[in-house]
Image (tube, rainbow, N blue to C red):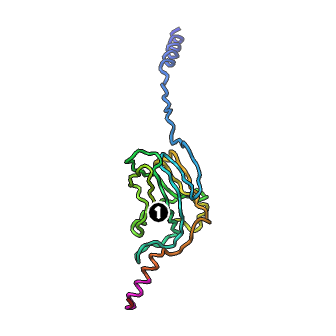
């Protein structure tokens, strides 16, 4: 009888001591929207409109005889942004990268600021109704195909849009014109021709 009483007591206690399970109902990394746009189209995300107006490919970039050669190909993409509904004084700073058809991603070339001056200014205050433009530079392997610019509204990939960069829309220019001109002028100076 004593064993039965102990067994019943243990069963009752084990039922009362059930572990409380807490489930986190917060969704992790939920993507609100993914849309694809073409070059020349306005793509709106969080009150900012983005448009790729041009894409050029270079093997070397620079604005003087000081330049940088690409390990693959530099894609210089002209991006036009417009405040289409965000509060005045908002400083936009989206996450931007180039993606190829195999899913490889390429970040902006951070050294480009030493060679070209018209990079987009992510610290710019966008005034309502005004546009701001500049270039993005990506060093991409020569065999990368099916490129698209990915723009995220923050760095956690919550909402993103894609702007396709068709191969037919990319102007291949080789060495940036300013580098060629600076080298020609340097050669003329060395030769003593003014």
The residue furthest bottom is 192
Q: How many marks?
A: 1
Give yes or no for residue 147 being in the magenta stretch.
no
Quadrant where the C terminus lies?
bottom left
Q: Position of residue 192 (x, y in %)?
A: 37, 91
Above or below — where is 46 with respect to 61? above
Crowding around mark 1 (Cα neighbors within 10 Å: few <14, some 14 to 19, many 20+) is: many
Q: Residue at x 48, y 64 (%)?
A: 137
Q: Which residue is mark 1?
A: 135
Q: Quadrant of residue 65?
A: bottom left
Instruction: Report the front residue among 149 and 128.
Output: 128
User: Which structural element holds mark 1?
Assistant: strand
Q: What kind of secondary structure does the magenta stretch mostly adopt?
A: helix
Q: Position of residue 38 (x, y in %)?
A: 59, 56
The residue furthest top is 1
The residue furthest front is 129
Instruction: Report the front residue among 44 and 22.
Output: 44
Instruction: Tell whether 71 sits left or right of 88.
Output: right
Q: Residue at x 45, y 76 (%)?
A: 179
Above or below — where is 177 with respect to 139? below
Above or below — where is 119 with respect to 88? below
Q: Is residue 164 visible?
A: yes
Q: Position of residue 31 (x, y in %)?
A: 54, 43
Q: Is residue 155 visible?
A: no
Q: Residue at x 41, y 87 (%)?
A: 188
Instruction: Report the front residue among 175 and 20.
Output: 175
Instruction: Tell whether 191 sits left or right of 73.
Output: left
Q: Position of residue 191 (x, y in %)?
A: 40, 91
The magenta region covers: 184-192
Above or below — where is 63 with respect to 84? below
Instruction: Report the front residue among 185 and 106.
Output: 185
């Amino acid at each position: 009888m004593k064993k039965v009483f102990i067994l019943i007591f243990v069963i009752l206690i084990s039922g009362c001591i059930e572990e409380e399970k807490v489930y986190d109902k917060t969704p992790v990394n939920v993507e609100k929207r993914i849309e694809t746009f073409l070059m020349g189209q306005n793509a709106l995300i969080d009150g900012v409109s983005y448009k790729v107006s041009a894409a050029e490919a270079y093997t070397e970039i620079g604005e003087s005889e000081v330049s940088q050669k690409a390990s693959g190909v530099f894609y210089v993409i002209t991006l036009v942004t417009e405040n289409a509904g965000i509060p005045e004084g908002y400083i936009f700073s989206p996450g931007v990268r180039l993606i190829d058809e195999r899913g490889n991603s390429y970040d902006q070339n951070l050294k480009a600021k030493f060679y070209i001056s018209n990079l987009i200014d992510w610290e710019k205050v966008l005034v309502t109704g005004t546009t701001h433009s500049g270039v993005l530079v990506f060093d991409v392997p020569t065999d990368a195909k099916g490129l698209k610019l990915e723009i995220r509204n923050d760095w956690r990939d919550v909402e993103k849009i894609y702007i396709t960069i068709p191969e037919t829309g990319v102007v291949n220019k080789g060495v940036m014109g300013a580098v060629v001109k600076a080298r020609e002028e340097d050669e003329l100076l060395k030769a003593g021709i003014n």
